[in-house]
Image (cartoon, grey):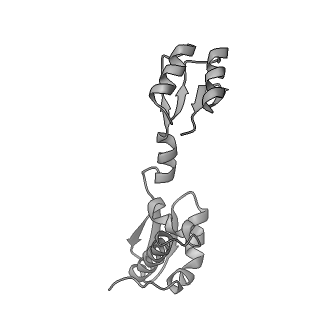
Amino acid sequence: MGYTTSTKAIARMGTELKQMINSTTNVEWTTPDPRTFAYRIREAIEVARKRFHSGSTEFEAIAKLKSKYAIKEYPNRVVAELRDGIPLDILTSRLSILTIPNVSDAFGIVGACIQHAGATILFPDAHDVDEMVKNWASETGAVISTSESGVTVRQVK
């Protein structure tokens, strides 16, 4: 039997879905019919995903539950177990920063920025920025920030 496409499936499991959205740990429910209960949770998430992928942002938080949890059935209970992997949005943001070690001088920073145009680059071994890099950044529209982790250059494409 296939999943419904009606948002009534989301409304039917609204309380459980809100628990999953607000939780940072596994969520467990006791039920006499774990197979049906788990099916209804999966169905509600799938309806939300279809609506979200067709352009509606109303059910975005519910749609993202599929990547956050795995729904498991056990005798007399259903458990929404956190997945081991890193969610895609967090992974994408982490991978979007290019880290270039062993570069700390002005020529190295500017050269790496030119070679990797359009990227956000972290130079962990650079701790201060000289006038040449500041001039280059102002001419190209790049934004330079310094922190304990090094110098970060964000370039506008």
Residue at the farthest front position: 139
Q: Determine the residue positioned at 56% across, 72% down.
A: 59
Residue at the farthest left position: 1
Considering only vertical position in the picture, is 29 above or below 149? below
Q: Determine the residue positioned at 50% across, 63% down.
A: 64
Q: Determine the residue positioned at 56% across, 74% down.
A: 16
Considering only vertical position in the picture, is 65 above or below 30? above
Q: Quadrant of residue 138?
A: top right
The reply to whether residue 108 is visible in this rendering is yes
Residue 126, x across and y down, in percent = 58, 18
The reply to whether residue 130 is visible in this rendering is no
Judge by depth and name the residue closer to the eye, 119 or 126: 119
Name the side, left or right, on which 17 lies relative to 36.
right
Q: Quadrant of residue 24?
A: bottom right
Q: Determine the residue positioned at 46% across, 40% down.
A: 95
Judge by depth and name the residue closer to the eye, 25 or 119: 119
Considering only vertical position in the picture, is 79 above or below 127? below
Quadrant where the N terminus is found in the figure: bottom left
